[in-house]
Image (cartoon, rainbow, N blue to C red):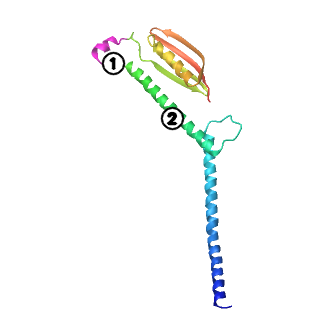
Amino acid sequence: MGYLGQSLEAKGSMKRKQCSSSSPTKIERKTIEKNRRDQMKNLYSTLKSLLPNQPSKEELSLPDQVDEAINYIKMLETKLKECKKRKESLQGRERSHACISDGTEARLMTSSSPKAPEIEIHEMGSNLEVILTSGVDDQFIFYEVIRILHQDGAEILNAKFSVVGNTIFHVIHAEVCYN
């Protein structure tokens, strides 16, 4: 073989060496990509497990699962904002019934005057027991508690009350219905 034959043979062996040196790089890339896909699959599986069960018979595609997660998170954010507003409004009512330290108003606050409403909530599994103590002039609070329970999806099982002096004791038993 002449110079040209040796040159072509040398180039061919260099290409084989380059291919053999790039093969581990390809294998590494394939491994990295497989690990990335496995990780994404695990993340999608975790995301799906955090969503409420859908009664759908067919499996949702991954983009549809992400859309469901987005909608669910937005719904939870909206519900959280509503609960915060409701809490603030209830706390505002509580403050309006708070004891006033002004001398003239303090004289009006005698033992016969009503005290601020009190609410105790006892959770027992999916059942709730709500004990509301209020004055005779605070009947609207009982209706507000019933409304809130209904709005949050609770079913009222029974409600009882008793009157002692100027104080009304309400006991409400409800069952929470989870969606």
- Residue at x 52% of width, y 15% of height: 170
Q: Secondary structure at mark 1?
A: loop
Q: Amino acid at mark 1?
A: Ile
For the C terminus, the quadrant is top right
For the N terminus, the quadrant is bottom right
- Left or right of 101: which side holds 126? right
Taking depth in this image into account, of 40 and 169 the one nearest to the observer is 40
* Picture layout, residue 88 above or below residue 137: below
* Picture layout, residue 19 above or below residue 62: below
Q: Is residue 107 magenta?
A: yes
Crowding near pointer 1: few (<14 within 10 Å), some, many (20+)?
some
* Number of numbered discs visible in the structure rendering: 2
Disc number placed over residue 100 in the picture, else none: 1
Disc number placed over residue 77 in the picture, else none: 2
Residue 98 % position (x, y): 38, 20
Q: Which residues are magenta?
A: 99-110
Q: Amino acid at mark 2?
A: Glu
- Residue at x 41% of width, y 13% of height: 114
- Residue at x 63% of width, y 66% of height: 26
Crowding near pointer 2: few (<14 within 10 Å), some, many (20+)?
few
Disc number placed over residue 47 in the picture, else none: none
Q: Is residue 70 magenta?
A: no
